[in-house]
């Protein structure tokens, strides 16, 4: 294998592909907003907490600074076009306002399931999170840690214990307008009794 030294400003691309989550928020006046974000991860399982990173110049960042929480939905690979439309700053998909953008995405959202923002009804599932910490580490993104208040799973994809029952095929972003999915899953044996 040969290694190519790359530009530091593109180092984040080595972390790709990453799931393209949908982050839902509300403006201080209550206007719904949903954007795709691949910067999200679980940071605690007891209590259940997730961390998201959002560009400081985006409306979603302002909503996170003023709001009490956010939603995180997990779209499937067949929802790529709608997710790409929601990423209007990158895709160039133009709409007059956020409400129109949500409708024009062609994705189905529930605006009442969470007080923190809309959730994707037809994805793999969603979380509603109360913000417990906001962090600014000086970069172009700010961080929000949310404690999960509600979790909803697609019952055709998960069992009652939230274990996947099939290949999930979440939408994953490689970079820009290039997407992929996880593909086939497989199981390895445990090395000790559980």
Image (tube, grey):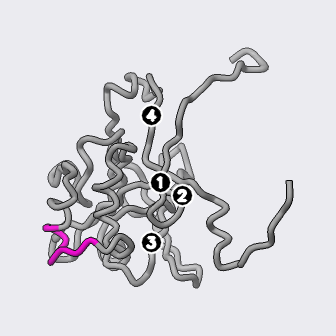
Q: Is residue 94 magenta?
A: yes
Position of residue 100 measured from the top left corner of the image (x, y, whole percent): 13, 68
Q: In percent of the image, x 34 and y 61: which residue is there?
A: 84
- Sequence-wise, the earlier of marks 2 and 1 is 2
Q: Which residue is mark 1?
A: 179
- Overall secondary structure of the magenta section: loop
Q: Is residue 112 magenta?
A: no
Discs 1/3, front: 1
Discs 4/3, front: 4
Q: Which mark is residue 54?
A: 3
In this orientation, which residue lies closer to the viewer: 164 or 116? 164
Q: In percent of the image, x 45 and y 24: which residue is there?
A: 166
- Sequence-wise, the earlier of marks 2 and 3 is 3
- Sequence-wise, the earlier of marks 4 and 1 is 4
Q: Which mark is residue 168?
A: 4
Q: Quadrant of residue 156?
A: top left
Eyeballing the image, is 157 above or below 7?
A: above
Q: Which residue is mark 2?
A: 174
- Contact check, label 2 and label 1, Cβ < 8 Å: yes
Position of residue 138 measured from the top left corner of the image (x, y, whole percent): 58, 84
Specify the quadrant that holds the C terminus. Answer: top right
- Contact check, label 4 and label 3, Cβ < 8 Å: no
Q: In percent of the image, x 37 and y 43: which residue is there?
A: 76
Would you say 115 lies left or right of 62 here? left
Q: Secondary structure at mark 1?
A: strand
């Amino acid at each position: 294998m040969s290694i190519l030294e790359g530009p530091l400003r593109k180092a984040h691309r080595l972390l790709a592909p990453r799931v393209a989550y949908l982050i839902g928020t509300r403006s201080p006046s209550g206007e719904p907003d949903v954007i795709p974000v691949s910067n999200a991860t679980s940071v605690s399982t007891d209590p259940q907490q997730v961390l998201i990173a959002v560009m400081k110049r985006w409306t979603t960042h302002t909503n996170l600074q003023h709001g009490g929480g956010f939603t995180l939905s997990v779209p499937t690979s067949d929802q790529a076009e709608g997710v790409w439309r929601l990423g209007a700053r990158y895709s160039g998909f133009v709409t007059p306002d956020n409400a129109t953008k949500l409708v024009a995405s062609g994705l189905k959202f529930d605006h009442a399931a969470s007080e923190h923002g809309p959730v994707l009804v037809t994805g793999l599932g969603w979380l509603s999170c109360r913000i417990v910490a906001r962090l600014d580490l000086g970069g172009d993104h700010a961080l929000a840690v949310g404690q999960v208040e509600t979790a909803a799973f697609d019952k055709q994809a998960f069992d009652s214990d939230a274990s996947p029952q099939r290949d999930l095929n979440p939408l994953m972003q490689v970079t820009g307008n290039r997407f992929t999915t996880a593909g086939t899953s497989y199981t390895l044996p445990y090395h000790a009794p559980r």
